[in-house]
Amino acid sequence: MSREHALEIWRAAVDAVRPEPLVRAAVESDPTIRAAPRVLVVGAGKAGPGMAAGLEAALADRLDRVEGLVNVPAGLTAPLRRVRLHPGRPQGVNEPTAEGVAGAEEMLRLLAGAGPDDVAVCLLSGGGSALLPAPVEGVSLTDKLAVTKLLHRSGATIDEMNCVRKHLSRVKGGRLAQAFRGARLVSLIISDVVGDPLDVIGSGPTAPDPTTFADALDVLTRYGLRDATPASVLHYLEAGRGGLTPETPKQAPPNVENRVLGSNRIALDAARHRAAALGYRVLDLGAFVEGETREVATAVAGVVRSIRRDAEPLGPPACVLLGGETTVALGGATGKGGRNQEFVLALGAKLKAEMAGVTVLSAGTDGEDGPTDAAGAVADGATLAQEVAADEFLRRHDAYHFFERAGGLIKSGLTGTNVMDVRIVLVR
């Protein structure tokens, strides 16, 4: 029953951030959007189809005034009436593509051609960075992808990766909003970043950017990546630091508004309410959890022990909730998995025999976890009884194959939203 409860709590979290009702309510309550002579729609992200459908539903009585496109993963491009869903990358591959560049360039042209009374709506959600590529002149998509992969494998945070990507882009870091020539631009956002910073979500295409070229170079230095970084990237960033290339915008234009509709906090609130309804005492550790996955698992193992042995800060039956997003530094490992699957395996390996009566679930709200077809994993003491095997799979960062054999992979398929991860630990 505990596994079923964990899955029910996770599904409640995901349902609370479904994009279509969030966007529909936001547009229906905005008289400026509804009264505009023309509404231009742009954007990118895994929640793009639902967000665009919500906008069309809100403007159903005036759809002839709507036009635009949103870059989404391939396979999520079922036709809508007025907003074109453009395949920006293959499903399961979180990398920029030439198709994504083509969509981004069409958005730039659409916004630059806006009339003085036109209103633009940018629909932005998780995955927007990879789905909205437009490399600066002199830097190829291949070179930009190479530096992104270097940062990812080195364990850089999303803030650090976005700092570099913004300074290599014609749309990120406020550049998309800079291209707009109409009356008002409203960004409706489903956040996939810890703390919901507007400049980081999707690399902030409509938000001012507080980071600089010097900051981007510092990130590469911090992770020892300068020698491995493509020469074109280093040359462009160095030129920017030297004042030879314009910085990203540091202030938002007065006609631009950024509004967060969905977030990890909202998902955790829904999870907390569902867990309480199922009879659990809830310890919500919040939406600001980040850091190396195994270190977070070690800290949570300590919380579980405190609940079991001392009934502190609460006693069983307990539900511990964590949001945010952790990282995995792969080093030279070649195993298959993702941060959520690794969290479940690492927590089990830390608790070992103490996993009796404990169920742990960790999954991405988008239905994806690393380069796998799973959203994450769910396990209990029986699943993780093979202590030696668990340690060996952990050493290889190969959680996927452990859970494929032992059972516990969560294969939800793409959920249509993305507000980072939800982790649920049930203690009886």
Image (spheres, helix red, strand yellow):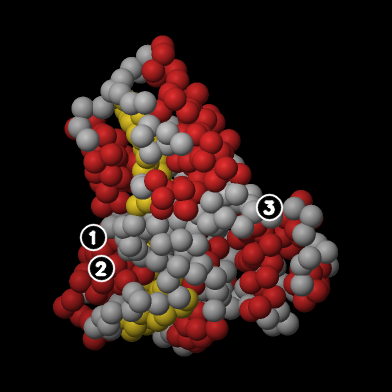
Relative side of 112 to 211, left or right: left
Q: Which residue is mark 1?
A: 21
Give coordinates of residue 144: x percent, y percent: 66, 73
Circle 1/circle 2 CB separation < 8 Å: yes
Question: Neighbour class for label 1 at 10 Å: few (<14), some, many (≥20)?
Answer: some
Residue 181: x and y, percent?
48, 80
Does residue 95 sit above or below 282 in this rendering?
Answer: below
Asked if disc 3 and disc 2 are in contact, CB closer than 8 Å, the reply is no
Say which residue label 3 marks: 331
Furthest residue to the top?
310
**Residue 315, horizontal then vertical, whole percent:** 33, 17
Q: Which is nearer the N-term, disc 1 or disc 2?
A: 1
- Identity of the amino acid at label 1? Pro
Is residue 343 depicted above or below 277 in this figure? Answer: below
Q: Is residue 246 left or right of residue 320?
A: right
Question: Who comes first in sequence, dot 3 or dot 2?
Answer: 2
Q: Amino acid at mark 3?
A: Gly
Residue 250 visible from this viewpoint: no
Q: Tag 3, which secondary structure? A: loop
Quadrant in the picture for the C terminus: top left
Q: CA distance from mark 3 to mark 1?
A: 41 Å
Hey, what amino acid is under mark 2? Gly
Front: mark 3 or 2:
3
Residue drawn 52% across and 30% down? Answer: 350
Tell me residue 412's x, y (percent).
Answer: 31, 57
Q: Secondary structure at mark 2?
A: helix
User: Can see residue 416?
Assistant: yes
Tag shown at residue 54 = 2
Identify which residue is drawn at 47% across, 44% down. Answer: 324
